Image: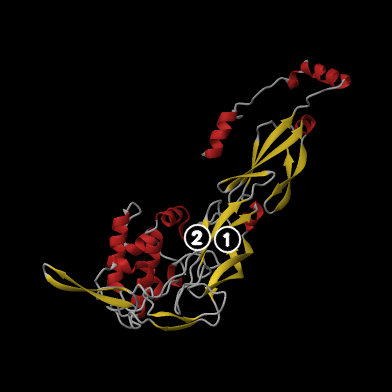
Amino acid sequence: MKKRDLYEVLGVDRNATPEQIKKAYRKKALEFHPDKNPGDKAAEDKFKEAAEAYEILGDADKKARYDQYGHAAFDGAGGFGGGHHMNMDDIFSQFGDIFGSAFGGGFGGFGGGGGQRRMKGSNLRIKVKLTLEEIANGVEKKVKVKRKVQAKGVSYKTCPTCHGSGQVMRVTNTILGRMQTSTPCNTCGGTGQIIDSKPAGADAHGMILEDETVSIKIPAGVVDGMQLKVSGKGNDAPGANGIPGDLIVVIEEVEHETLKREGENLHYDLYISFAEAALGTSKEIETVSGKVRIKLEEGIQSGKILRLKGKGIPSLNSYGSGDLLVHINVWTPKTLNKEQKQFFEKMLEDPNFVPKPEKTDKSFFEKVKDMFS
């Protein structure tokens, strides 16, 4: 199902300020909050949809990627991006501070009112190198990552400070009288539990390092420096009911030997001899989808650009692909033997070898201008 535009979800335009985006999200989330709409699945979906929109538009880097590539920047088949993949605890954990006391002094979980808090693990970040062919066709990569995971055999007990509530009450005297506030427990971090026992080798939080092979499906058309997210493949969170962090995949494009990328278009320099230019020929050239043979008409000029439609990089955020632009370069020999010199000296007297640019022929600068228009 096609996803809605995130700006439309929050009801803001693309020039909205961070404060306007935050305000719009707060309004939507309050409208569809589970406490106001108990048992309403449609309201819950809208609540999650608003959280997805704010997760991206509320972050300057993610917003810039969305503005350039749309949902495709986050929606690779390997679980990239936020959206309806977020559960309620993810939302409450990440955005609870936005709501202040609108729902009983906190936003720590279902039913409002603070309570035990689910911690989220830290994200992991890796670079994945891709060839131009892999970028053009899409690829599945298997990468090995070292994750912090809960050690087997860790047991927990109720926090003696908050007695399992995850919150501690503080009473302060003010000029208006005694005020009571609820804050996350420092002893257990708001989880309501602390470690009772742990196996040897585990750290203070009951965590160990473990190698894991993660499969990442990378869509065609990604660009160098682009970040993709694999949900739940970062470090585990401390505690019994934590939420794992995410794996951030940074794309690194490997330079191609013969093809140069410019957006969705590719460029290829084809060198031919003077004889081939004069007589015409056919040449096999390399593309990201294999080799193809092209025909060069007799009398082709150096600087001519041949455009092979659809032989470039697929568009990440729309249909179709870019083109392959083949730049013709006529190679002039640097040295000549006696017979060759005599041959070309005779050609100097032949009017057919005097340059006669046609009116339709464009100058070098005009060709460059056309390439970028």
In the rendered view, tell whether residue 190 sits above or below residue 52: below
- The residue at the point 62 percent across, 48 percent down is 309
Q: Secondary structure at mark 1?
A: loop
Q: Residues within 10 Å of mark 1 (few under 14, many from 20)?
A: many
* Location of residue 255 in the rendering, given as x and y in whole percent from the top left corner: 64, 47
Circles 2 and 1: CB atoms closer than 8 Å = yes
Left or right of 136, for residue 179: left
| Quarter of the figure with residue 11 | bottom left
Which of the pair 240/87 is nearer the observer?
Answer: 240
> Does residue 4 appear in the picture of this structure?
yes
For label 2, the residue is 72
Q: Label 2 vs label 1: CA separation?
A: 8 Å
Three-letter amino acid code of the residue under disc 2: Ala
Image location of residue 292, percent across then percent down: 73, 49
- Pick whichever, 349 or 19, lies toward us: 19
Instruction: Tell which residue pokes out farthest to the right in this image.
Output: 339
- Front in this rendered view, residue 334 or 366: 334
